[in-house]
Amino acid sequence: MADEAQGEPKKHEVFEKPFKVQPVFEMRSTPESYRRYPDGDKLPSQLKVWKVQDTGQPFGSVVTHSYGYEDSPDAEILTPGFNDGKESGAVGVGRHASFLQWGFSAPPSKLTPAGKNFFLNSICYIHKFDNAAPLVRQEAMSRDYVVFLASIIPQLNDPNEFFSGIFAPDLKKIYQSDPKGFGKYMEGYLEFLYQDNTYKPDLELKSLGIPTNRQVQTLERLISLLEDEKQKQLAQKLLLRYTTESFQTPAQWKAWLESNKSRLYFSDIGGYKFRMMPEGYLK
Amino acid sequence: MILCQGLFHFQRRWLGARLVFLILALGVSGTIQRAQAAYDPDKIALKILYVGVPGSEREKDFLSFLKAHFQEAASADIGKFSEDQANNFDVILFDYEGEAFKAKRLRLSQTYKRATVTIGVYGALMGGDLRLKTGYT
């Protein structure tokens, strides 16, 4: 990452208190590296940035991929960082539970006035999360990133490596029949991707006519299918796949969903499962 | 006899308590560079622990900035940090001067959940070790 945060600051207390952060905006040419990532071709030729620090170096600081960053309620992106290695939107400053990662590298004497205020506010802001444990930890890559990896395989010397460690081996035939189309193929199954040691589309879920694996309605539909003699075995299998529960009867599943629906979220990063946030977590 | 045993146990407990105090004093407080300043109503009412490379220009830079804005700011050595050292502070900052990828990394436990700011590449590597979303990917 360079010296700059990217885009206008979002409406968030970390830019407001105790000190008002007043960025000085500049326009920068869109890095060529952004074009390699999904939707990179749709970016304008110039992007709005603001300096957080003044080292004059285009590197030295660090961004984290944004894919899946906010798929659990314990994490948030505070600002993207302007960078030439990862995607547009990669995280320069972000929070997960009680940890705030300040990706900029300069010591305070090299922060701009806006950067100093942002840094001070970040310290004050993270104090609110003292003793907040993470709800999820990194168990898997997010589906957007998996699709990105699928799209770059043709550029790699050893695609076999991807099919032994990342993608399910039975997808290799599909890749071999159309290497350049493999990314699009996986993107077509975006709503069905999941991880079971390797990443693959959930064709079992799709066969039930359910449009996605990550909406609470998916659970409702699966639970209703437990009453269907033909589908009940598959429905039970999928409920075990996408939750951390192991109920055996439709009544137990129903009662669990009714009591906890408002606290459920689906996290790719947390292992492609519905998880439950603690009572009152979002207050 | 019973009285003697009671005294013996009391002495042992008392000596044990003194020993614990001594260990805490040397092992914890001894490694934190801390100067108690008078309360300043113009400063942010938080106690900050900066954990970095002792004696470095970078540490001085951070400490001077933090002391100017927060009620209290102290420093500790990232190479010798133990989680107990965070106890008397509100926010802990972890920072490193030098090549982060080559540095021996501080490994926090999975149960550590204090309000923390991790800085730069070293901070992202720490986040990765903890399998946090803030981690280097």
Image (spheres, coloured by chain):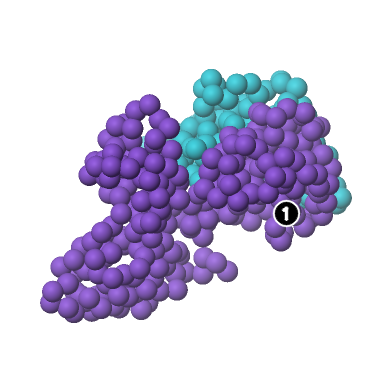
Chain colours: A purple, B cyan
User: Does residue B89 appear anywhere in the picture?
Assistant: no
Place of residue B121 in the rendered image (x, y in percent of width and height, measured from the top left): 59, 31
* Outermost residue, left side: A229
Q: Quadrant of residue B81?
A: top right
Q: Is residue B3 above or below residue A222?
A: above
| A185 relative position to B45: left or right | left
Q: Which residue occupies the foreground of this view, B9 or A259?
A: A259
| A248 relative position to B51: left or right | left
Q: Which residue occupies the foreground of this view, A117 or B53?
A: A117
Q: Which residue occupies the foreground of this view, B110 or A154?
A: A154
Which residue position is annotated with label 1? A9
Which residue is drawn at the image coordinates 43% and 32% (left, top)?
A155
**Pointer 1 indicates a residue of which chain?**
A
Place of residue A61 in the rendered image (x, y in percent of width and height, measured from the top left): 65, 33
| A248 relative position to A131: left or right | left
Q: Identity of the amino acid at label 1? A: Pro
Q: Is residue A245 above or below residue B37?
A: below
Q: Quadrant of the C terminus of chain A?
A: bottom right
Which residue is drawn at the image coordinates 52% and 36% (left, top)?
B136
Q: Quadrant of the N terminus of chain A?
A: top right
Q: Is residue A113 above or below residue A233?
A: above
Which residue is drawn at the image coordinates 26% and 59% (left, top)?
A203
Q: Which residue occupies the foreground of this view, A278 or A187?
A: A187
Which residue is drawn at the image coordinates 80% and 44% (left, top)?
A26
Other-residue count near label 1 (Cα within 10 Å), few / some / many at <14 / 14–19 / ≥20: some
Q: Quadrant of residue A209?
A: bottom left
User: Does residue A227 appear anywhere in the picture?
Assistant: yes
Place of residue A246 in the rendered image (x, y in percent of width and height, measured from the top left): 23, 64
Label 1, secondary structure: give it. Answer: loop
